Amino acid sequence: MNIKLMSFEENDIPNLIRWVPGPGASDLWASRTYPYPLSELMVSTHLQKADRRPVELRVYKVVVEGSAEPVGHVELDHFDHQVQSVRISRLFISPEYRKCGVAQQAVEQLLKKCFIELNLNRIEVYALESNYPALRLYEKLGFRQEGFLRENMVLNGIKQGSFILSLLKSDGAAVNFTA
């Protein structure tokens, strides 16, 4: 199964809301931006940041090639145009498409966009200390741990820390995403 990234649009909002069926479901990936219950207004208001100049936010839907139905969501935010850096945020894969390589393909496509199309030098991500699948994925793709933020997030009412990971264009693993 191959995926592609496409611009997230207003008509994609109901899918995102459907993927978060109850309290706690958005904590791991977007609790501060999209607290439960998600609403069309909440998501639409957040998407308005994508229209600002200079660019502050890019939002993508993850789509299986040959289908128009989104299977995931991912954002680039915290653009720093001087340093040429960005943060991958709010990666979310529809429950029925987890554990089949969709997240990895989505991040690989995102890295190509960042390094080639956007000509960025640094990509960072925060991964919650208990989110072992995310940590494994980013490290597999060449991201390096840079630090740890203690108790900077709340998951199910419990304070947890986050690892900061980054990938530079000059890193050996990044070569695969710049060719």
Image (cartoon, rainbow, N blue to C red):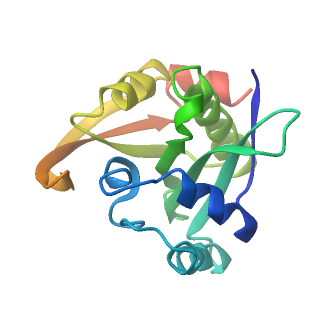
Q: In this view, does 126 lie to the left or right of 7?
A: left
Tell which of 31 and 174 is nearer to you: 31
Left/right of residue 145 with respect to residue 110 in the rendered view:
left
In this rendering, does residue 84 appear at all? no
Residue at point 18% right, 42% down? 148
The C terminus - image quarter: top right
Residue 137 position, x and y percent, is 44, 25
| Residue 75 drawn at (x, y percent) | 56, 55
How far across and down, in percent of the image, does residue 83 sit? Answer: 49, 57
Residue that sits furthest to the front in the current view: 21
Classify 57 as above or below 160.
below
Task: Give me the residue at 37% from left, 22% from top.
Answer: 136
* One can see residue 109 in this view: yes
In the rendered image, the residue lying farthest to the right is: 66
Question: Which residue is at 29% across, 33% downward?
Answer: 131
Residue sitting at x 52%, y 20%: 172
Residue 111: x %, y % from top left: 61, 37
Asked whether 37 or 65 is in front, the reply is 37
159 vs 175: above or below: below
Q: In which quarter of the image is residue 146?
A: top left
Q: Nearer the viewer, residue 115 or 91?
A: 91
